[in-house]
Image (cartoon, rainbow, N blue to C red):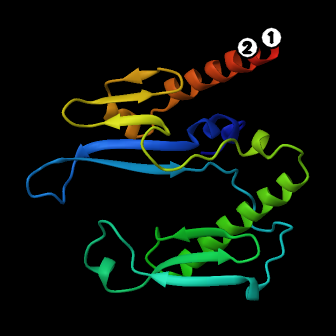
């Protein structure tokens, strides 16, 4: 997303998301619960003032996963880069080419290292990054239930909708607005305490 305050709005999406659906890989058609941790970072221009020494990197290639046709299992085009001094790991498998994935992963690594550099100058790491939770049951900020009924519910704000398809297509405004209201009342309550 681009535009004024884009990062400020979308940082509300940071956290663990839970998806309940019928697994396309299960012959019995059983429900499956999956979790994903989402981190939201500002898109930083490519000419960052971040120096990365090639000897500090471990670059691994692997085969992409997921739907993708015949190409998917034939080449190791996915890239994982580990910045050894900081332990920062980024990975990219979105592009067909290993070189495109490496370029995108390096851009992501620069953005993460830039944020780490900024955070080093800030007293409270939690003010910028927020709480990092395990990707596990009970830590989700939002649940997306696609079977046996459709419901998307934000567990922080209690905002919910039955139009799961619209949310999965990017209709996040009710959840972002609910988060902004929730966080402002949470901050006000903390100040009054």
Residue at 54% in and 75% down? 101
**In the displayed structure, would residue 69 be above or below residue 9?**
below
Rendering coords of residue 104 (x, y %): 60, 70
Q: Which residue is mark 1?
A: 192
Rendering coords of residue 6 (x, y %): 66, 39
Quarter where residue 144 is shown: top left
- The foreground one among 16 and 44 is 16
**Alpha-carbon span between mark 2 and mark 1:** 5 Å
Q: Is residue 160 left or right of residue 139?
A: left
Quarter where residue 50 is shown: bottom right
- The foreground one among 116 and 166 is 116
**In the displayed structure, would residue 55 be above or below residue 97?**
below
Q: Is residue 96 left or right of residue 11?
A: left
Q: Number of numbered discs present?
A: 2
Rendering coords of residue 4 (x, y %): 72, 37
Quarter where residue 80 is shown: bottom right
Please tell me whether mark 1 sits on a helix, a strand or a loop. helix
**In the displayed structure, would residue 15 be above or below residue 65?**
above
Please tell me whether mark 2 sits on a helix, a strand or a loop. helix
Residue at 57% in and 28% down? 176
Q: Which residue is mark 2?
A: 189
Q: Is residue 114 left or right of residue 165?
A: right
Q: Is residue 78 left or right of residue 87?
A: left
Residue contact at pointers 2 and 1, CB within 8 angstroms? yes
């Amino acid at each position: 997303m681009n535009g004024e305050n884009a990062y400020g709005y979308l940082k509300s999406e940071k956290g663990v998301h839970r998806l309940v659906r019928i697994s396309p890989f299960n012959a019995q058609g059983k429900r499956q619960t999956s979790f994903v941790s989402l981190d939201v970072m500002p898109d930083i221009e490519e000419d960052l003032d971040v120096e990365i020494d090639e000897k500090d990197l471990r670059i691994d290639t692997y085969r992409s996963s997921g739907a993708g046709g015949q190409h998917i299992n034939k080449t190791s085009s996915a890239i994982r880069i580990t910045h050894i001094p900081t332990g920062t790991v980024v990975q990219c498998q979105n592009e067909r080419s290993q070189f495109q994935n490496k370029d995108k992963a390096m851009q992501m690594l620069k953005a993460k290292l830039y944020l780490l550099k900024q955070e080093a100058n800030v007293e409270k790491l939690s003010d910028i990054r927020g709480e990092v939770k395990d990707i596990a049951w009970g830590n989700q900020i939002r649940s997306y239930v696609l079977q046996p009924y459709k419901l998307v519910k934000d567990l922080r704000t209690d905002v919910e909708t039955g139009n799961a398809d619209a949310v999965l297509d990017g209709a996040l405004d009710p959840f972002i607005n609910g988060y902004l209201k929730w966080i402002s009342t949470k901050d006000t309550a903390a100040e009054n305490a």
